[in-house]
Image (cartoon, helix red, strand yellow):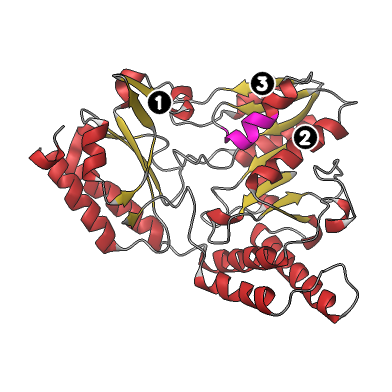
Amino acid sequence: MIYLDYNATTPIDKSVADAMLPYIQTNFGNPSSSHEFGITAKRAIEAAREQVANLLGAKPSEILFTSGGSESNNTVIKGVAHSFRSKGNYIITSHIEHPAVLNPCRFLENNGYEITYLPVDSYGSVQPRDVENAITSKTILVTIMHANNETGTIQPISDISAICRRKGVLFHTDAAQSVGKIPSRVDELGVDFLSIAGHKLYAPKGVGALYIRDGITIEPLIHGAGHENGRRAGTENVIFDVGLGRACQLAQALLHDNTVRDLTNRFYRELQALFGNKIRLNGHPENRLPNTLFISFLGYTIDAVHKALANVAISTGSACHSGAVTISPVLKAMGVAPEEVGTVIRFSLGRLTTQNEIDIVLDNLSDLFKGNDDYSI
């Protein structure tokens, strides 16, 4: 199998696994203990916190370790809703957010909060003017993702954050797909909260982080003892926190390495040369993640494309049930009609993707284009 689904999850980098091993085998202390075992574990967590902070251009005190992107998003959305209820009950988001944002918003909507779901343009981009027009005196939070997991389109976060600051509204971005792929410094983005998912940047599944700007206090999602400076109860996951810290350190070192970007762009050029106007790139052609291609194969059935890519791990953005084509909510929000969507495949490349693998994929797709009988229905 060839793996081209890095936006779904990434393998654990070897150096990340190596960093975790001592805390699996030897340094097993509870960070809250005052003896040497506990002190060693506590130091490891704080070193990891600093590594995450360095990648984001934040202070270590502003980094909260969580179980992943979903917990980070829930912590912000529900925490702000509870802590700022006296100011208002109005939250703004968009139609293209991850379910880890949309479902907490729907939960709040069912409990007396008002939620506005902003539209996007044909590239899948939120317009800052729509955010500004939606803000009212009762708005307590705006939450817009940094980059979309399907299209890869990068949102105008700094423009939106400037509006929120001017209006006195807190701003959160789900940066699970962007951190480690593109610069995601909180001072440049201007955000109050930022969510990270470890397994999207070569750390383990089950760990994440949340940036909370100094001076902002929200109700914890998990109550108990005073772990994480009272912001998240539960004995710290030293092993995974160390892994996330090392993954962020590695991401910072590789942030300006264009290997993946160059390979992705070459892949797209080859697809264009092969299929011409029978493919369409969904999302912004330039302002997108450097590893992501969300491609519509026009005039090709889902079964035929899947046969051509039988040995390739990819994600789909459309499906056919009983002769009817259904499309992802993101494509629908972008105004793509079901009859125009074609067969949509998300190719997302990563550090381990090789030129040879891309050539194999192109060879398989070439057989599809030529109408090879093996790929007919």
Q: Which residue is mark 1?
A: 327
Give the numbered dot on residue 116. Answer: 3
Mark 3 lies on a secondary structure that is strand
Classify 94 as above or below 62. above
Viewer-nearest residue: 142 or 359: 359
Circle on res. 272: none
Q: Nearer the viewer, residue 199 or 87?
A: 199
Q: Tell me the residue at 79%/77% (across/down).
A: 40
**Label 2 element class:** helix
Q: Main secondary structure of the magenta part?
A: helix
Residue shown at 49%/63% (left/top)? 256
Query: Which mark is nearer the camera, 1 or 3?
Result: 1
Locate the N terminus and report the quarter of the image it occupies: bottom left
Quadrant position of residue 374? top left
166 within the magenta span: no
Separation (CA) of disc 2 from disc 3 = 16 Å
The answer to whether 189 appears left or right of 274 in the picture is right
Residue 4 pos. (x, y %): 37, 52
Residue plotted at (78% across, 32% down): 169
Q: CA distance from mark 1 to mark 3?
A: 22 Å
The answer to which quarter of the image holds residue 344 is: top left
The crowding category of the residue bearing disc 1, from other C-alpha atoms within 10 Å (few below 14, some 14 to 19, many at least 20), is many
Q: Is residue 370 visible?
A: no
* Magenta segment: 97-104
Residue 110, picture quadrant? top right
**Disc 2 target residue:** 78
N-term-proximal mark, 2 vs 1: 2
